[in-house]
Image (cartoon, coloured by chain):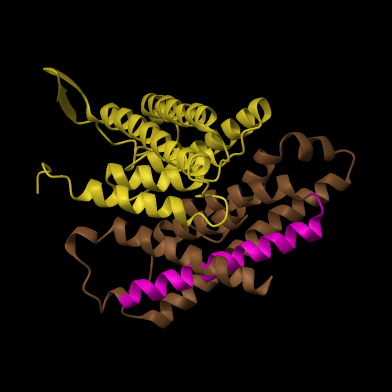
Amino acid sequence: MYSLIIAFGFLLAMRGAKPASLHRPAEGLLRIWREASDLLLTVDLALMLLAISLLFRGTRPFAQEYAVLGAGLIVYGASRFQKKTDVFFLSAAAITFVIYSRQYDPLHGLAMAGSVSVGIGLFQTCFWGLRYRLLFSRVPASMEGWPVLCLLAGFISIALWGFGRLIF
Amino acid sequence: MKLPESLFSRMLLAYLPFMLYPFDLFRSGVAALWIATFLWISSAFFWFTRRFFPERFLKPAFFLWLLVWAQAIGTVTKLPPLWIVSAFFLMPVSFLETAGKAGRVRIFSKEVPRYFFERALAGLGFLGFATLLTLVREIGESRLGTRLVDQPPAGLLFVIAALAFLWKNQPFRRP
């Protein structure tokens, strides 16, 4: 699950939504956490609807057999309603299915979605902060772009893992 | 739909969800091959049929296509649908635009549509990229005893950073 947070945190940080300018850090942070809460609501909605459809005899076979399609359609509708990007939709659909496939208990599923969304928000906040710091650093031209961004993601991954181990 | 992106960016972004598959080299290779094949099938299908879709339904049709395939492959092979995110990132610029015309590129004195050339290259590049990184992961885990992906995935991100550095600083690259 931790790898899921890092992979999709990095993906959404790079292509999730149109980023705010690095020169306005407060706006960027606000946008990151709004996106994370939207992701949480979208994933929770899909998980809840899937859990509800498992309760009824008429819809149970569909929810069991066509979970990917069902979750995908729910997330697609929710993403379009919120006018989100395609990357947001695909990420939310993938996260929903990964959680659903590992956790059938709805409450545990919701808790897992919460921790994934908070983790993604935390990752993006750290990533945003480090990218902001890079504005004032002299990065060699050969390291600009993907090399330095991947290094940052790797270091954040280690740091968050360390904090997680300390707390839990 | 999306901004035009370089081949390396697309391969890297497509690899991030693929990284979550806990597969060995063979199964990773098969999954990557499937993603590349799916990319080629989708590219050909939507290139030839995009005029038949009403413009506003083209994008939903594409996403429905992705979801239906994810469901079908998930039912048959139990492959989690993370691969549709990879396939999406491998499709570069606005291939769903009905007005788009394919430019041409010369390969071995034969002109082929740039559209198909770029998709073929993206698929092959992703296949090589994913296989290489899985090989690195296998070596790291079996020979060196390090866990590059599971907890945390930093090891693979550092390897990707090294690959990005090498890609960016190719000695014979045109400026």
Quadrant in the picture for residue A4: bottom right
Relative to B78, residue B173 above or below: below
Q: Which chain is brown?
A: A
- Please report the residue visible at 38 percent of the width from the left and 73 percent of the height from the top: A130
Relative to A65, residue A45 above or below: below
- Please report the residue visible at 45 percent of the width from the left and 59 percent of the height from the top: A10
Q: Position of residue B98 (x, y in %)?
A: 34, 35
Quadrant in the picture for residue B58: top left
- Please report the residue visible at 47 percent of the width from the left and 57 percent of the height from the top: B154
Q: Position of residue B40 (x, y in %)?
A: 40, 26
Q: Position of residue B127 (x, y in %)?
A: 39, 31
SS assignment for the magenta stretch, majority: helix
Q: Which chain is yellow?
A: B
Q: Is residue A8 left or right of residue B160?
A: right
Relative to B127, residue A116 above or below: below
Residue A17 visible from this viewpoint: no
Q: Is residue B50 left or right of residue B73?
A: left
Q: Per the image, is B31 magenta?
A: no
Residue B22 visible from this viewpoint: yes
Q: Is residue A68 left or right of residue B16?
A: right
Give the magenta part as a residue range: A104-133
Q: Is residue A20 left or right of residue A29?
A: left
- Please report the residue visible at 59 percent of the width from the left and 47 percent of the height from the top: A94
Q: Per the image, is A105 magenta?
A: yes
Relative to A44, residue A167 above or below: below
